[in-house]
Image (cartoon, rainbow, N blue to C red):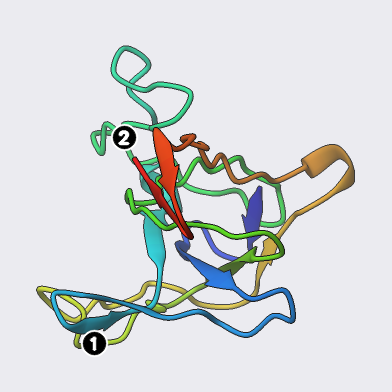
Amino acid sequence: MVSSETDDADVFVLVQKTTATGTLIPTTVFGVADPGAHGQLRASLRELDQQKSTDAIPFYTFSKRQPLKAGEPTLLEIEIWPTSRIWHAGESLQVNIAGRPIRDKSWFLPTEVESINQGMHTIYTGGDYDSYLLAPVIPPKYTSGKFVVR
């Protein structure tokens, strides 16, 4: 849930892997440092295509602008782009939410994203406005020594 002082907001999400003590565990993709799985949504374009959306993947229509109402909590379902990591006991997820791109500029961003954000935006995370991250767990096919192979 998000609310804004204005009628629109850009919301960026980054999910990262950490050690048991909270230290980020980096990875590389094609030799480039990868900060983690990300997603983004312009709140006014949040309308879902009910026929194509699933519990795991929201599919946006982008066809109708739905302005936010100042100060009123609004549900956003933000798709996190697929990624895969192996997790060991004690490792955690860190979820970052921001009003600007969180990923490094070197990471396949085709153009500079110009944010429309102005004023204060509020993210609701508890009580009547529980937020959640849906993360599937795919069990290994078999294990070989220290490595788990799917």
Determine whether 146 is above or below 17 in the image: above
Determine whether 55 is above or below 37 in the image: above
Q: Residue furthest right?
A: 127
Q: Quadrant of residue 12?
A: bottom left
State the image coordinates of residue 20 (x, y, percent, origin top left).
Answer: 72, 74
Residue that carries the numbered disc 1 in the rendered image: 105
Left or right? Give the position of 27 relative to 129. Answer: left
| Type of amino acid at the residue the image marks with label 2 | Tyr
Q: Residue furthest top?
A: 51
Q: What numbered label is drawn on residue 75?
A: none
Kindly indicate whether the residue at mark 2 contacts the one at mark 1 (C-beta within 8 angstroms): no
Please rate how many residues cluster around mark 1, counting C-alpha atoms within 10 Å: few if below 14, some from 14 to 19, many from 20: few
Which residue appears at 60% of the width and 40% of the height? 75
For marks 1 and 2, give the one nearer the viewer. 1
Which residue appears at 37% of the width and 16% of the height? 50
Pick the residue in front: 52 or 80.
Answer: 80
Which residue appears at 19% of the width and 81% of the height? 112
Element under disc 1: loop
| Type of amino acid at the residue the image marks with label 1 | Lys
Please rate how many residues cluster around mark 2, counting C-alpha atoms within 10 Å: few if below 14, some from 14 to 19, many from 20: some
The quarter of the rendered structure image containing the C terminus is top left
Determine whether 139 is above or below 83 in the image: above
State the image coordinates of residue 10 (x, y, percent, origin top left).
Answer: 43, 64
Element under disc 2: loop
Residue that carries the numbered disc 2 in the rendered image: 60
